[in-house]
Amino acid sequence: MMTSLATLTIGQAPRSDIMPLLMAHLPAKSVTHVGLLDGLSTEQIEERYAPAPGDAVLVTRLLDGSQVSLAAPRVEHGLQEKIDVLEALGCMTILLLCTGEFNHLHASNALLLEPDRIIPPLIGSMVGEHRAGIVVPVESQVIEQANKWRKLAKAPCFAVASPYLSDDQALTEAAMRLAEQGAEVVVLDCIGFNKHHVDVLKKHLNIPVLLSNVLMAKLAAELVV
């Protein structure tokens, strides 16, 4: 039987790297975890989702912990198919576990929670005229993210560090660069970031560090009936 809430990752479920963090806010018995790449081999993932030149790129985590790069347009098509299936099974709330920007995802009856539509205005209302620093996992996303964050009162600054490469030094250096550019709050804007990454940064920064996935999980929890 389908639960009332499903998490939908662009990688493979369950996401052991972020499950403890998410499930601190979500009721375990009411949640089903689904991944776009569930059951696919490395070769099948490459064949279906490998980025072509010019494609916007998304990164995610496989069950073995490795990082994989995916073509955003192909991911969006695959996610829509998963959303359709979840709705047909009776799921009423779908929490998308990806902070990438999508333009055409939709649900007919279920509540579809898309971080790219929720997180920027939420951060904007929180920081007001203060400057936000955004950490993204790959360099190509810096330009792509400019549109996503365009409505902030003050243009954000960006830095690059992947949560999937186990490089705390790179993350720390990225966040320090944001602070040097005047960031008054750091947003770890990839679903793969977790409490460990926040703890690492709190040792070096004297400004708030926010996790996009925690914000989304808290909102989703309010919709579980």
Image: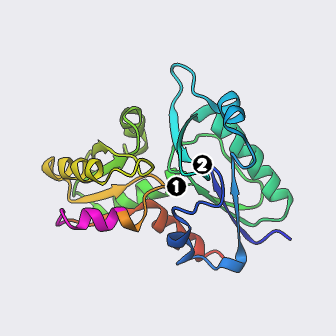
x, y percent for residue 9 = 62, 53
Residue 225 seen from this side? no
Which residue: 72% across, 44% down? 80
Whether 90 is among the magenta residues is no
> Up-down: is 41 above or below 62?
above
- Extreme front residue here? 64
> Up-down: is 1 above or below 45?
below
> Up-down: is 168 above or below 47?
below
Which residue: 70% across, 57% down? 34
Q: Nearer the viewer, residue 73 or 58?
A: 58
Q: Nearer the viewer, residue 168 or 139?
A: 168
Which residue: 71% across, 76% down? 30
Span highlighted in magenta in the image:
197-206
Q: Point out the image quarter for the C terminus.
A: bottom right
Mark 2, residue position: 62
Quarter of the rendering containing residue 124: bottom left
x, y percent for residue 195 = 39, 68
Q: Point out the image quarter for the N terminus.
A: bottom right
Question: Which one is closest to the eye, mark 1 or mark 2?
Answer: 2
Relative horizontal placement of residue 55, taking residue 154 as reference (left or right): right
- Please state which amino acid type lies under the numbered disc 2: Leu
Which secondary structure type mostly characterizes the magenta part of the structure? helix
Relative horizontal placement of residue 212, taking residue 19 as reference (left or right): left
Mark 1, residue position: 115
The CA span between labels 1 and 2 is 20 Å
